[in-house]
Amino acid sequence: GQQVMQIPQYQHVQEGEDFTTYCNSSTTLSNIQWYKQRPGGHPVFLIQLVKSGEVKKQKRLTFQFGEAKKNSSLHITATQTTDVGTYFCAGPFRNQFYFGTGTSLTVIP
Amino acid sequence: DAGVTQSPTHLIKTRGQQVTLRCSPKSGHDTVSWYQQALGQGPQFIFQYYEEEERQRGNFPDRFSGHQFPNYSSELNVNALLLGDSALYLCASSLGGIPEAFFGQGTRLTVV
């Protein structure tokens, strides 16, 4: 069946360091979305990538969609304490939406 | 413009009971999807409703059922609750099956 894996599962960084999470799908995706979920909160949409090799930036966040449309990454430059949370990738497959396993980011002040 | 709203926000039920959770989609959206998110896990797709019918279903038992009303709001029903049903239940809305981007704040269900 369809699987979406993310690594690492957990990441602790000092404030100001960079952070990257990687997302890998077992099947090709038509698009991929990224969400952020703060502790105790609900997933909040960050971005959607559609094209092979697409790169999008939002301030300190850079999102990439792989050439084969089976993997994606989220890179945060110079992390801040407000970046704390779990980052999920998600993509559609056969009319269902599959979320990745998530990467929990802790930022140490 | 209200986003996706869910009620109640928290709920405690006893094993074996039944529960109904409610969701109002974002204005203009006609599709509602339900997810279960266990602690420390990613959301798991339960089912999706469009035009008052269940369009897709994830790997959940028949104890999980739902309904969509003409105003596009939706209910999730879970019968014969098990301790393992304790989770955050999320509702997401979208338009015409476009992959959802709008989630409600969720209902935290605790089964004791």
Image (cartoon, coloured by chain):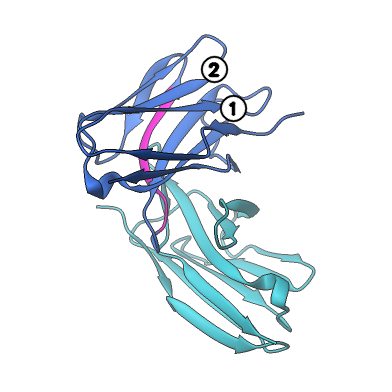
Residue at the image point whose x is 68% and y is 34% from the top: B3
Q: Residue B25 carries which label?
A: 1
Q: Which chain carries label 1?
A: B
Pointer 2 and pointer 1: residues touching (CB < 8 Å)?
yes
Q: Is residue A24 above or below residue A51?
A: below
Q: Cα distance, mark 2 to mark 1? A: 7 Å
In the rendering, at what x and y percent does residue A63 appear? 64, 67
Confirm whether residue A50 shows in the render.
Answer: no
Q: Quadrant of residue A62?
A: bottom right
Closest to the observer, A95 or A77: A77
| Neighbours of disc 2 within 10 Å: few (<14), some (14-19), many (20+) | many
Q: Which residue is drawn at 80% across and 69% down?
A: A59
Colour given to chain A in the rendered image: cyan
- What chain does badge 2 belong to? B
Q: Residue furthest right?
A: A59
Percent position (x, y) of residue A100?
42, 60
Q: Element under label 1?
A: loop
Q: Which of B101 and B24 is in front in this view?
A: B24
Residue stretch rendered in magenta on the structure: B42-49
Place of residue A92 in the rendered image (x, y in percent of width and height, measured from the top left) = 44, 45
* Same-chain status of marks 2 and 1: yes
Three-letter code, disc 2: Tyr
Mark 1: amino acid = Pro
**Residue annotated with mark 2:** B72
Count of numbered circles in the view: 2
